Amino acid sequence: MTYCIAIKLDAGLVFLSDSRTNAGLDQINSFRKMMIYEKTDDRFMTLLSAGNLSISQSVRELLQTMSIRDDTSDKVLTIWNAESMFDAARVLGAAVRHIYERDGVALKRAGVDFNVSMLFGGQIRGESMRLFQVYSAGNFIESTCETPYFQIGESKYGKPVLDRVLIPGLPLDEAAKCALVSMDSTLKSNLSVGLPLDLAVYAADSFNCDKVVCIDEGNPYFNMLRSNWGERLRAVFDSIEDPQWFGGNSSVPLVMDKPSPIKKITSPKEKLM
């Protein structure tokens, strides 16, 4: 399995992915889920993938040369000449559908679902940054101010901190820290997600990305973050008052007159309702 996060803020974009694809007692495989496409001073795009590895690798390989014909201008579009991230996302969607048309029947015959999901974001000169989530059918949705991030893979463990921290005006370094905390929560709770991690941070209107790093077990910053987050989370937990059940000296009692607590069943003859 895997876990990938993409965040779109006023200041830029943050992308983070793990590299675990198969985890068992005697087999652990790692493949990178992030691809960066960059034409300096013209466009920057990043692709994160989850799902069936053979499908996602095929889509990534095809995307570099995939083209579609625009319905309105009759122009042949690729990710390298598209004038908008929306058109680049259309090319990615077409690549997903092409792989489905090529391999879908054979996969189904073998009992394998066509399962792939992708996050695709970046900026093309002439427009603002955009971020998309692409599904197995090649269709996609775009992030909004109300939804500044997307997740794919094992998303539930790392979601709470993203919901509590991320706002459009958050600085990029704080967003990167938030993404790493989200990843740490996932690593802590799910063995199917694992190091190393790939992190890319893109500043708006720069059209190139020099903040790209691979984080392994020996990374000092990530080890510090994991240790501090765990310790301070425990310290905050310990600082919260315990619940008071039967009166006691508390300004925040747990037990109130209303609503009434659930009724106990004390004999076989009592009705549930």
Image: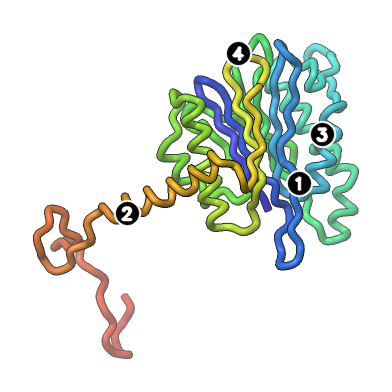
Secondary structure beneath label 3: helix
Secondary structure beneath label 2: helix
Q: Earlier in the sequence, mark 1 or mark 3?
A: 1
As rendered, which of 203 and 162 lies closer to the eye? 203
Identify residue type, mark 2.
Phe
Going 16% across and 58% down the picture, which residue do you hit?
A: 253
Q: How is the image coloured?
A: rainbow
Identify residue type, mark 4.
Asp
Q: Earlier in the sequence, mark 4 or mark 3?
A: 3
Q: Name the residue under label 1.
A: 31
Q: Mark 3 points at which residue?
A: 95
Q: Are marks 1 and 2 in contact (CB under 8 Å)?
A: no
Going 55% across and 27% down the picture, which residue do you hit?
A: 8
Look at discs 3 and 2 and give the one toward the viewer. 2
Is 244 on the left-hand or right-hand side of 116?
left
Residue at mark 4 to residue at mark 3: CA–CA distance: 27 Å
Look at discs 4 and 2 and give the one toward the viewer. 2
Q: Name the residue under label 2.
A: 237
* Percent x, y of residue 41: 70, 11
* Percent x, y of residue 204: 57, 17
Task: Please identify the quarter of the rendering in which residue 28 is found.
Answer: bottom right
Residue at mark 1 to residue at mark 2: CA–CA distance: 36 Å
Task: Please identify the quarter of the rendering in which residue 244 is found.
Answer: bottom left
Q: Name the residue under label 4.
A: 205
* Percent x, y of residue 156: 53, 51
Identify residue type, mark 3.
Ala
As rendered, which of 215 and 129 lies closer to the eye? 215
Q: Earlier in the sequence, mark 1 or mark 4?
A: 1
Q: Which of marks 4 and 2 is nearer the N terminus?
A: 4
Q: Which of marks 1 and 2 is nearer the N terminus?
A: 1
Residue at mark 4 to residue at mark 2: CA–CA distance: 41 Å
